[in-house]
Image (spheres, grey):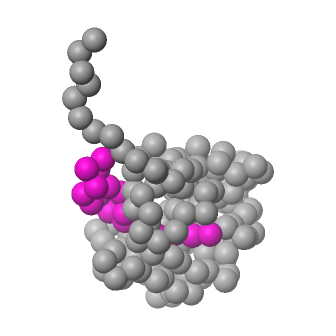
Amino acid sequence: MVLGRVAGTVVATRKDPRLEGHTLLLVKPVTPDGKEEAGYLVAVDTVSAGNRELVITVSGSSARMAHGCKDKPVDCVIVGIVDEVALDERG
Amino acid sequence: MRLGRVTGRLWSSIKNPGLDAQRLLVVQPVTPEGEDTGKPLVCTDATGAGAGELIYWVRGREASFAFESGEVPSDATIVGIVDEVHLGKRKAG
């Protein structure tokens, strides 16, 4: 799983009917120590994440295992809002 | 499967129900020599690994299979704690 920060929303009117009712968010990947990485992800939100929140994303076919995403055409899902990350000092 | 070292923990209260009761650990992939390689990532844990331990992990759809229900939304799971890694040329014969 990759950590990311919610950077915006994506609105799509014409889409696969199985995606109706799902919120699409724009996520900027970040490292566990909080540095932003290159690129953006468009992810389906299952936890009602808010703007600038640190979230956990699952990608690939495992994304369809998330509750609410069974048999839907998604490959990136937000599955958690991060409370805290604790890194070892030497990590 | 790849080698990695546990470098931290992560807590999340609001999460997808499929991740309930799952431990989330930060893992830095390492080479068999023990050097860091690639970006750190977040893994679910099927073994009870602890801080600083050398582990191996699977990625992709197989990461869900490590759990009995097989329905955990995870794309990276720790499936083993490494005791030892032996490196070296195999002797002929």
Along the viewing direction, whichever of A83 and A86 lies nearer the viewer: A86
Residue A61 is situated, as x and y percent measured from the top left of the image, at: 58, 47
At 25% across and 50% down in the image, what residue appears? B33
Number of dots carrying numbers? 0
At 67% across and 81% down in the image, what residue appears? B14
* In this view, A27 is above or below B49: below
Along the viewing direction, whichever of A49 and B11 lies nearer the viewer: B11
Magenta segment's dominant SS is loop
Along the viewing direction, whichever of B77 and A65 lies nearer the viewer: B77
Q: Is residue A59 left or right of residue A19?
A: left
Task: Tell me if residue A20 is in the magenta stretch.
Answer: no
Q: Residue furthest right?
A: B69
* In this view, A76 is above or below A26: above
Image quarter for residue A33?
A: bottom left
| The residue stretch that appears in magenta | B23-40
Along the viewing direction, whichever of A34 and B28 lies nearer the viewer: B28
Image quarter for residue A18?
A: bottom right
Q: Is residue B86 left or right of residue B23?
A: left
Task: Tell me if residue B35 is in the magenta stretch.
Answer: yes
